[in-house]
Image (spheres, rainbow, N blue to C red):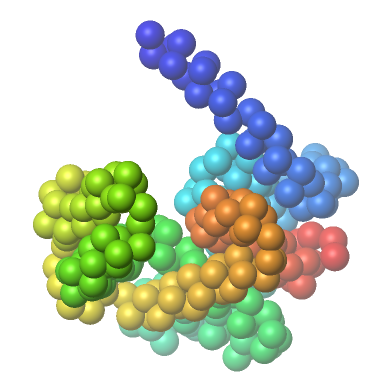
Amino acid sequence: MLKDNLEQEIQTLLPLMKERQEEIEPLRQKLDNLDWKIVRESERYYPLRFFADGLSAYVYVFDNAAVFYAWAAAEQALLIRLGPTRLGNAVANNRGRYPNEKKLVEIARDEGIISRDIKRLANRLRKVRNNHVHYINIMWDQHDGEIRLRDMARSTGPKIVKEILETVPYNKQAETLALFKLMKDEVESSHMIRKRQIPYIPGEPPNLEGKRFRNIRIKQFADWIKEVDDAREQQKRFDYGIERKDALDCLQWSADLLAYLNFLSE
């Protein structure tokens, strides 16, 4: 039974996987043009290995893994370019601990390894990675949105019911009211949290930097949807999903950083 279900799932995903393969083909081509025997024996091995893993994860619809590998490739490249001497100094200045991701980017900029523009790109990649690896930030955001949607449904509920009764044809009113009630039931926070089995603590999110950046990404995604006027194209972009867009953007940013540091071709 499990085998049958898995084979059916694979067949269902094949068109989507082919679509994703086409999206990352220019990035895949950069790897295919390399002599991997030489790469395996060089400093390029780990950054390019992780980057290749990220491309594969994207094709196989593991978006969180694609984001993780995109940053892992960039992080390894930065560490290699930093080198043992400068890395040792950074560890010594950090009470014997390796610099965290944010500090690593700052050190790379201070040491002239990356430009100001590449630093901004690396930080975008790092922030998306943090939200996906520490998924509690995204869960917090989802719950926060559900709370706001619930409060809106409660406060405007009577008005919406009144408008339904005044504007919807009589033979459609019962169906419309039932749909509205279903929506209200779904956004009740206690119901959502209990159903999903995720603990929720009101207040600030675990990572404020991640929360701020997530808000920017959501706005950018919404703007991307609204760039087109055709309703069908808008729906297609909405269905595309922000996490898929996160993954594809992270792979492109990672490729740009690897090219800047001479691990990949331009």
Residue 120 image offset from top left, x and y in percent: 61, 82
Q: Looking at the image, can residue 48 be seen? A: yes
For the C terminus, the image quarter is bottom right
Left or right of 229 on screen, residue 182:
left
For the residue pair 181 and 215, the one nearer the viewer reads as: 181
Is 71 placed left or right of 150 in the picture? right
At horizontal 62% and vertical 82% (from top left) the residue drawn is 119
User: What residue lies at 47% left-to-right and 19% top-to-bottom?
Assistant: 6
Rendered view: 243 above or below 213: above
Q: Quadrant of residue 17?
A: top right
On the image, the x and y values in percent for residue 4 come to 46, 11
Point out the image quarter for the N terminus.
Answer: top left
Q: How many marks?
A: 0
Q: Is residue 55 left or right of residue 29?
A: left
Residue 67 vertical placement versus 18 (above, below): below
Q: Nearer the viewer, residue 92 or 205?
A: 205
Residue 62's place in the image compared with 115, above or below, is: above
Residue 264 in the figure: left or right of residue 100 = right
Q: In the displayed image of the protein, which residue is found farthest to the front?
A: 170
Please identify the quarter of the rendering in which residue 146 is found: bottom left
- Nearer to us in this view, 198 or 147: 147
State the image coordinates of residue 9 (x, y, percent, origin top left): 50, 24
What residue do we see at 55% from left, 77% from top? 123
